[in-house]
Structure formats: C-alpha cells, structure tokens
Amino acid sequence: MAGDASSIPELDQEKYDSNEQVSTYALTLYKYSTTVEDKSVVVDFWDTAGQERFLSMHPSYYHKAHACIMRKVTYKNLTSWYKELREYRPQIPCCVVANKIDADLKVTQKSFNFGKKQGLPFYFVSAANGTNVVKMFREMIKRAVDYKQNPSDFMDEVMQELENFELEKKEEPVCDAVKSDSPDLG
C-alpha cells in the first residue's frame, strides 16, 4: 500500500512492530500483519516522501501497489499525484485522509471536493488519539486484498501470471545431469 502511513503505529499496537520499520531517504517502509476474511495477510506500507524533489521517484512506488492513501495536508498536489498514479495504476483503490483532527475539529466541517470529485472515500483521522485510524486502515486493507484477488488492470494480470510461472519453475523437480557422452546428444 502506498501513501500516508503516519497513523500506522496507532493501527494496532499489538501487531505493529517498530523494529519492522525501515527508513530510507525518500521512503519509510512498515510491515503489518492482520487477517482479512479469516486469512492471514502481511501488508507492506510505503510511506512516500511528498517533497517536490522526490517527484521523479513516484512511479517506482506505484509498481505492485494494491491501494493508495493520500493525505489532505498535501491538498495542493493531490490532483497531480492522483493523475500520475492513475497513469501507472488506473484501477487500484484509493482514499483521501485528513489527519490531525484532534488539533482542530473544525476541519471535519469543511468540504474537500477532491475526494468527492474523484469518487474516493474520505476519512477524518487522528494519529494522536486514534480516531478513525483503525477503521480507515481496515477498510483500505480489505479493498487492497479484494483488488489483488480480482485485479482490473491488465498489467496486474500479466504480473500475476509471471509470478505464478516463476513459482511453478521453482517447484519443478531438478533432473539428474545428463552425461555428455550420451548418444541422444549427438
């Protein structure tokens, strides 16, 4: 899942392991284990840098993403980021999040047209006190799992077939080496 991951530590303190956070210059990775419809799922969250100097890196983040969470704090860039995302991942589920509602509840009374215009779910959350964090992540994880199981992007289908092919190759039994003096090798 790509996008805003500032609320991940609040998602589930028992299942979130801060030792599984890997920070890089323009990206922070988190791993989270959960269950969806009685199946264990490990989610990789990619918290991407929003600064303009990292814009050229965005396409590499989209590869194999199954959902995207965008933050309202970067509202002025949402349109361009969303357009770019849709160039690479036209069908993955997305949502928009307004964080820090604990600091200013008036923000929940504002209308944010971007989400409505794009038909995206919009969540008001607080990473500080946990308001709506679990709800938002659970819904987005469920949507990501559903999408992965039933991709609607042609490239997802191609990538899944390639992954299945690679798995089949690894599972094939290794044959004994054929001697070079075999009459069949002419």
Image (cartoon, helix red, strand yellow):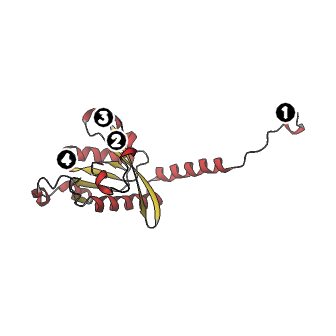
Tag 4 secondary structure: helix
Q: CA distance from mark 3 to mark 1?
A: 55 Å
Indicate which label's residue lies in the foreground, 2 or 1. Answer: 2
Outermost residue, right side: 183
Displayed quadrant of residue 110: bottom left
| Residues at circles 3 and 2 in contact by the CB criterion of under 8 Å | no
Mark 3 / mark 1, whichever is N-terminal: 3
Give the residue at x 34% y 46%.
85
Quadrant in which the C terminus is drawn? top right
Tell me the kind of residue under disc 1.
Ser
Could one spot residue 150 in this view of the protein?
Answer: no
Tell me the kind of residue under disc 3.
Phe
Task: Give residue 137's position: percent from left, percent from top.
Answer: 32, 58
Q: In this rendering, is residue 48 above or below 157?
A: above
Q: CA distance from mark 4 to mark 1?
A: 67 Å
Mark 4 / mark 1, whichever is N-terminal: 4
Q: Mark 2 sits on what residue?
A: 28
Tell me the kind of residue under disc 2.
Thr
Q: Mark 4 sits on what residue?
A: 73
Which is nearer the eye, 42 or 158?
42
Tag 2 secondary structure: strand
Could one spot residue 12 in this view of the protein?
Answer: yes
Give the residue at x 34% y 61%.
138
Q: In this rendering, is residue 91 above or below 46?
A: below
Q: CA distance from mark 3 to mark 2?
A: 13 Å
Task: Classify residue 129 as left or right of residue 39.
Answer: left
Q: Mark 1 sits on what residue?
A: 180
Task: Classify residue 169 as left or right of residue 37.
Answer: right
Task: Give residue 19's position: percent from left, percent from top.
Answer: 38, 44
